[in-house]
Amino acid sequence: QVQFVESGGGLVQPGGSLRLSCVASGLYFHNYDMAWYQQAPGKERELVAAISETGGLVDYVDSVKGRFTISRDNAKTTMYLQMNSLEPEDTAVYYCNAVHRNWASGWSTPAFSVWGQGTQVTVSS
């Protein structure tokens, strides 16, 4: 059974940093591209960062470029999101999932219908 467990969120002041973790189980982790999604209050879940199977390719939405860094450790079946220079607009619940992705076009869709509980990030003074 596929499972994703996100952690590392919290309350942080604008300009602060957080490091999110996603532990995956029940899948061949190293065979999947992975992604972080954010769901802000009243909005749909959207992809913010993606990473290829080996970590050689990464991509970000424009709003987080230069501030967020996605990485993975296949030996630990874990993915990370380093979030720096956080802004109030980053406030959301963050989720992870494996993805089917076309790196040329940027098209991406979640590989599994299963989602974890997410981790809440709140950026506020």
Image (cartoon, rainbow, N blue to C red):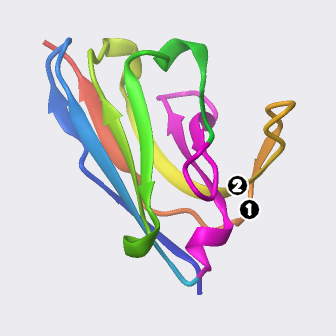
Q: Nearer the viewer, residue 11 or 66?
A: 66
The quadrant in which the C terminus is found is top left
Residue type for callout 2: Val
Residue type for callout 1: Ala
How many residues crowd around disc 1 within 10 Å: few (fewer than 14), some, or many (20 or more)? some
Q: Quadrant of residue 98?
A: bottom right
- At 22% across and 35% down in the image, what residue appears? 18
Asked if residue 22 lies left or right of residue 112, the reply is left
Residue 25 percent across, percent down from the top left: 49, 79
Q: Earlier in the sequence, mark 2 or mark 1?
A: 2
Q: Which residue is mark 1?
A: 111
- Give the extent of the magenta segment: 27-56
Residue 59 percent across, percent down from the top left: 61, 31
Q: Which residue is mark 2?
A: 99
46 above or below 86? below
SS of the residue at dot 2? strand
